[in-house]
Image: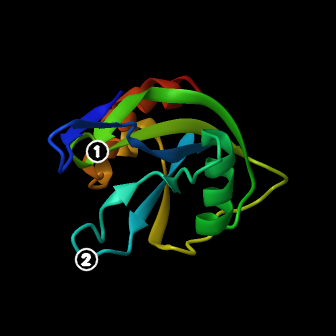
Amino acid sequence: MRTERASGSGQDDRREPKVVVGAAIIVDGRVLACARSAPPEVAGRWEFPGGKVEPGETDTVALARECVEELGVRVEIGARVGRDVRMAHGRSVLRVYVARLLDGDQPKALEHSELRWLSAAELDTVPWLPADVPIVAALRPLLAAS
């Protein structure tokens, strides 16, 4: 996926979108959902933990780093969930992966206001951020099967 914009010289400036990764951490048929604490316009909305892929990082390395920073947990990254979700008018893309907690690690709300474990039947009980909604739909059959 590419985005285009005109530069000051009138020529197209083609850039790859920034990649944001998220973790669908699944334990016993439930997925971890995280309530944003900031910025104010999204505080209280729910998301999958994760963040930006930094230059030189792969998706999986970035996601493992973000899980340590946001939740204090180590994870094993698995398969993709759903498709790429365009965000910020195409300037970024969200990619979510299944993740498994390692060595009995337990998530802590280090950067979120609240954490909840949701079953397939409970996925619609929280207000998700718009980018996470298609992932929730793709995740539902995975949770129902586990």
Among all residues in the image, which is located at the extreme front?
A: 9
Q: Nearer the viewer, residue 89 or 95?
A: 89
Q: Amino acid at mark 2?
A: Pro
Disc sitting over residue 97 in the figure: none
Q: What kind of element bears circle 1?
A: strand
Q: Position of residue 73 (x, y in %)?
A: 71, 60
Task: Nearest to the eye among marks 1 and 2: give it.
Answer: 1
Where residue 79 sits, quadrant-wise, is top right
Where residue 5 sits, quadrant-wise, is top left
Residue at numbered disc 1: 87
Circle 2 packing at 10 Å, graded few (<14), some (14-19), many (20+), is few
What colouring style does the render use?
rainbow
Q: What kind of element bears circle 2?
A: loop
Give the side of residue 41 with respect to residue 22, left or right: left
Task: Identify whether 58 is placed above or below 62.
Answer: above
Task: Identify whether 5 is placed above or below 42.
Answer: above
Residue 28 seen anywhere in this rendered image of the structure: no
Q: Quadrant of the N terminus?
A: top left
Residue 113 seen anywhere in this rendered image of the structure: yes
Q: Position of residue 12 (x, y in %)?
A: 22, 35
Q: Amino acid at mark 1?
A: Met
Give the side of residue 28 with respect to residue 124, left or right: right
Disc sitting over residue 40 in the figure: 2
Give the side of residue 75 with respect to residue 128, left or right: right
